[in-house]
Image (cartoon, rainbow, N blue to C red):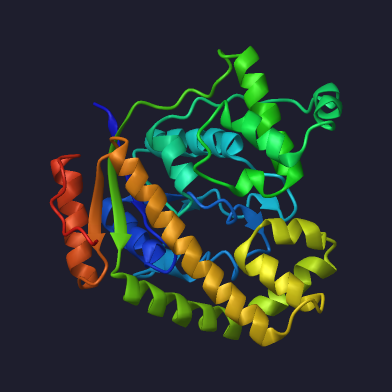
Amino acid sequence: MKTKLLTVTGPTACGKTALAAELAYRLGGEIISADSRQVFRGMDIGTGKDLADYHIHGVDIPYHLIDIHDAGHEYNVYQFQNDFIAAYNNIVERGRQPILCGGTGMYIDAVVRGYQLADAPVDPDFRRRMEAFTDEQLTARLASFIKLHNHTDTEDRDRLLRALEIQEYHSLHPDRYPHMPDMDHVIVCVAYPREQVIERIGIRLRQRLDQGMVDEVQRLLDSGVAAARLMRYGLEYRHITRYLQHQCSYDEMYRDLYTDIRRFAKRQMTWFRRMERQGVPLHWLDGTLPFDKKIDIVEELMQRGSEKNIVHKVQ
């Protein structure tokens, strides 16, 4: 029998971690993080690790792919795939239930649809040849290989060059891919009405600032992480770094960060809905339901398998 992989996803501030931790407690599970920034040590508040959520009912829920690299490391979806496979196999071999939890849509999609990605060494000759091209030309070249659903790789020339370098390498070495385990997927996407998402984002942002998110970014800068690198991590790290470098006022930082997080949540939902249109069976879970009711629904899904939606879809 295939092992079921339970995935708990959704936009920022929807309560994914607490839900996944409770499910892990009840199902005898362990959590694999699907968050592109939680892999970094020292980036705790800004990435929403919420590590306290993993201690419930007097038990510490095991988690994986959190705090595995120093801030500043260049982490990508290929590395995530390989790290996921290692964590998943380890969990299954010990007879535990794997639970993938996070909001990075590309990471979720890479597991569910088994992206075929190959490692690609840095190619100095390729880099030199690309110096003659503009960012627009490089983006067009990248788009000839893949659909650009995620624009993160096109906002920075270094990332753009690396993404193109990887795709060029793939085209020449089509047989060098990670082997994704054979899994049955139960994918739960927690969603709230838009006005409640906005409210929850505001509450969570204020909580994180009160918890010392600005001090966290300052510590990273003091530890030697370059400001340019921090800003490439986006959202909280971009805006707070700008504030600490006196490029904006605190009020401007707060306003722009709040706006960008709202936009980010909207992009996350767009990604998940696109996955559904492309044939991925998502179970949309109404975030406004009582917590225990949500747990009961997901447990029933795990018992019934990946039948089409039995939960309330949030528009």
Question: Viewer-proximal residue, 195 or 121?
Answer: 195
Residue in the foreground of this view, choosing between 275 and 15? 275
Res. 218 image quadrant? bottom right
Q: Position of residue 233 (x, y in %)?
A: 66, 57
Q: How many numbered discs?
A: 0
Residue 97, visible in the rendered structure: no
Locate residue 102 relative to residue 153 in the image: left or right.
Answer: left
Which residue: 70% across, 74% down?
240
Q: Position of residue 248 (x, y in %)?
A: 74, 79
Q: Quadrant of the C terminus?
A: bottom left
Q: Residue at x 18, y 40 (%)?
A: 305
Q: Position of residue 157 (x, y in %)?
A: 75, 44
84 versus 145 height, above or below:
below
Question: Residue at 29% across / 68% down in the picture?
Answer: 192
* In the image: residue 147, left or right of residue 97: right
From this viewpoint, is residue 281 visible? yes
Could you tell me residue 23's position as x and y percent? 29, 57
